[in-house]
């Protein structure tokens, strides 16, 4: 006989996942305006600095385990921290700068396709015909989200924003594969701490390559509130911890649909608060993309 508390207990995990991804939907409110007066690389560096400091106690408690990661583990960690964290966030924010953030957010849902292709290549996992069909539908939908009229102009800001969004999806999708390879050796908080600190080092190197603005420290100081909100509450630490806590007690099929709260909520927030709309073709294509990705996840689980 099922206890009275079993129902609410079953809902706790999915609610935590939905809450985490819905918190992320508020990220655009801060990120998009900041791209207008602060260089993207400096935003990314500041976010990683705040996240790295938040996870510093975790890293200090587990430094011996981190030092013994090994060569292969170190390469995977670079893929997660440098690629998935620093470069992924850099290109994602650049996409916000040049285009409609709702388009960039929807295009991020192509990550599972990238992750599965890389898993097949690196880990020898099999790609089914069903997956290939759904991937084709998802990619076609992505094209019409980015270019609703079907016409591609190589001189438009739209192609630049689309390229940046897909580069972010590439880095985040590959980070998923590398992260899976390291989860056997590290608990989630430790892996996240390492990810932030490698991401911080990568962001700093990227800033040295691109060059800081003349008002670098001044911009960081005056924008510390929105930067902290993004790093801790909308795009970083707290949603990440809440998401994985919910995922640990939630079946994969249920988690898949809970995760769909993010693009739906983000598009709604962008539309209502920032005025970034989608036309009918983009809405239908977005629905088709999300449906294809959900069916992929259900098939895998």
Image (cartoon, rainbow, N blue to C red):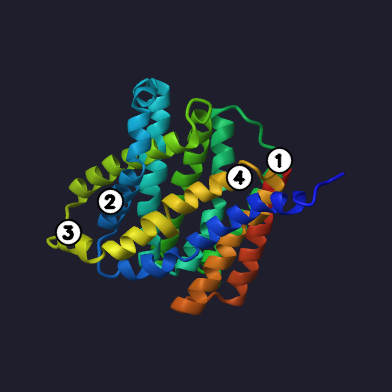
Sequence-wise, which precedes: disc 4 or disc 3? Answer: 3
Look at mark 2 in the image and give the residue it sits on. 45
Residue under numbered circle 1: 301
Sequence-wise, the earlier of marks 4 and 1 is 4
Measuring 32% from the left and 53% from the top, which residue is drawn there? Answer: 47
Tag shown at residue 247: 4
Locate residue 1 relative to residue 283 in the image: left or right. Answer: right
**Looking at the image, which residue is at 27% across and 40% down?**
201
Secondary structure of the residue carrying numbered label 3? helix
Q: Earlier in the sequence, mark 2 or mark 1?
A: 2
Circle 2/circle 1 CB separation < 8 Å:
no
Q: Earlier in the sequence, mark 2 or mark 3?
A: 2
> How far apart in space, not on screen, are marks 4 and 1 (Cα)?
13 Å
Q: x and y percent of residue 241 in the render? A: 49, 47
Marks 4 and 3, how far apart at CA: 38 Å
Q: Where is 94 relative to 75, above or below?
A: below
Q: From this viewpoint, is residue 152 visible?
A: no
> How crowded is the residue under tag 1: few (<14 C-alpha within 10 Å), some, or many (20+)?
few
Q: x, y (%) of residue 98?
A: 37, 67
| Residue 62 to residue 298: above or below | above
Q: What number is the disc on residue 216?
A: 3
**Mark 4 or 1, which is nearer the eye?**
4
From the viewer's side, name the closer residue of 53 and 142.
53
Above or below, comparing residue 191 to residue 213 in the picture = above
The residue closer to the viewer here, 69 or 190, is 190
Marks 2/1: CA distance?
36 Å
């Amino acid at each position: 006989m099922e206890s009275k508390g079993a129902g609410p207990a079953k809902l706790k995990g999915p609610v935590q996942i939905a809450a985490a991804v819905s918190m992320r939907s508020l990220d655009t409110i801060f990120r998009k305006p900041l791209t207008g007066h602060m260089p993207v690389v400096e935003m990314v560096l500041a976010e990683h600095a705040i996240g790295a400091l938040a996870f510093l106690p975790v890293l200090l408690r587990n430094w011996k385990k981190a030092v013994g990661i090994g060569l292969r583990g170190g390469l995977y960690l670079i893929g997660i921290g440098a690629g998935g964290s620093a470069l992924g966030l850099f290109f994602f924010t650049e996409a916000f700068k040049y285009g409609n953030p709702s388009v960039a957010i929807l295009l991020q849902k192509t990550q599972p396709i990238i992750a599965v292709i890389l898993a097949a290549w690196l880990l020898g996992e099999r790609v089914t015909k069903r997956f290939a069909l759904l991937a084709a539908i998802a990619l076609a939908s992505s094209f019409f989200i980015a270019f609703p009229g079907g016409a591609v102009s190589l001189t438009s800001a739209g192609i630049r924003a689309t390229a940046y969004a897909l580069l972010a999806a590439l880095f985040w999708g590959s980070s998923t594969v590398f992260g899976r390879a390291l989860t056997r050796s590290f608990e989630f908080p430790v892996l996240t701490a390492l990810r932030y600190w490698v991401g911080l080092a990568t962001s700093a190197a990227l800033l040295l390559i691109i060059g800081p603005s003349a008002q670098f420290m001044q911009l960081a100081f005056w924008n510390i509130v929105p930067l902290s909100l993004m790093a801790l509450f909308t795009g970083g630490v707290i949603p990440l911890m809440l998401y994985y806590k919910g995922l640990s007690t939630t079946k994969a099929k249920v988690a898949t649909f809970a995760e769909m709260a993010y693009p739906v909520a983000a598009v709604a927030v962008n539309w209502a608060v920032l005025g970034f709309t989608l036309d009918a073709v983009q809405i239908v294509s977005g629905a088709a993309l999300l449906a294809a990705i959900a069916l992929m996840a259900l098939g895998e689980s």
